[in-house]
Amino acid sequence: MKQSFFFAIIFLCVIRTGNGQTTGSSSSLDPAFVSVMESNLKVLDTAQSLVTYQSLANSFERIGNASGKYWQPHYYASFCYAILAVKGEQSAIDAMTDKAQDFLDKANALHPNNSEISTLQALIINTKILADPMSRWRDYGIQSAEWLKKAREQDPANPRPWYIDARAKMRMPAMIGGGTDAARPLMDEAISRFQTFKPENSIAPNWGAAQAAKLAEQLKKG
């Protein structure tokens, strides 16, 4: 984490001195921005504790505030808060998902019509259900399904909408359309797409393959 903070300080200094133009396109990513993002993403890849996810969320927020025009820092800050909502106390779910939503709105404003953002939107809504499943599962479930459908349309090659959908179905009772039988074909689609998916660049979203593989094994066991 000290290394991530060191790179963050360098990046902030570079941005404030006006080195490089930020357009947000993959062909014009500032090297300093890429360096600090890659450093933080390496930590994210192996993160386990709530403290680490919170530290990363804070770091991505600082990078996003400094860079101005890039959507990725806001996306990853949102992603960290979504994970904090899942891993933390049930009483904190609404607060954490609200924070995740705030950052995702910033990412969407900078890069609309993005399959990854739509997928994360579905994940946030699914996570909100956990705060009060009995009263929220129907309305929030419908909203999440609509976002996953949109994410698939925006990028049919993206495996993450299929993975999130499969994971949600696993947690739903069979009587309302969930269960292992409903989740298996979705997970199969996710695994197939993960095998061929190539991220746009080194800081583009590329999460979920390992988690999908573990859940696929669970589904095989019934």
Image: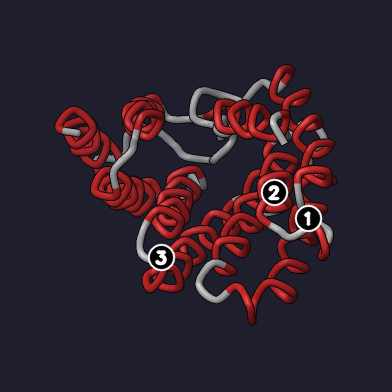
Q: Residue at x 71, y 18 (%)?
A: 195
Rendering coords of residue 25 (x, y %): 59, 35
- Residue drawn where x is 73% and y is 52% of the image: 169
Cα–Cα gap, marks 3 and 1: 26 Å
Q: Secondary structure at mark 1?
A: loop
Per the model, the C-alpha gap separating discs 2 and 3 is: 23 Å
Disc on res. 178 = 1
Query: Closer to the camera, 152 or 164?
Result: 164
Res 170 label: 2
Could you tell me the amino acid type at mark 2?
A: Met
Q: Secondary structure at mark 2?
A: helix
Residue 36 appears anywhere in the view:
no
Q: Earlier in the sequence, mark 2 or mark 1?
A: 2
**Residue farthest to the top?**
196
Q: Is residue 158 visible?
A: yes
Look at the numbered discs 2 and 3 and tell me whether their residues touch, using CB distance below 8 Å: no
Where does the image place residue 212, in percent across and percent down from the top left?
63, 32
Q: Give residue 126's position: percent from left, percent from top.
A: 62, 61
User: Is 46 left, or right, of 215 in this rendering?
Assistant: left
For residue 29, above or below residue 136: above
Q: Which mark is residue 96?
A: 3
Quadrant for residue 157, please give it. Answer: top right
Quarter location, residue 116: top right
Colour style of the rendered protein structure: secondary structure
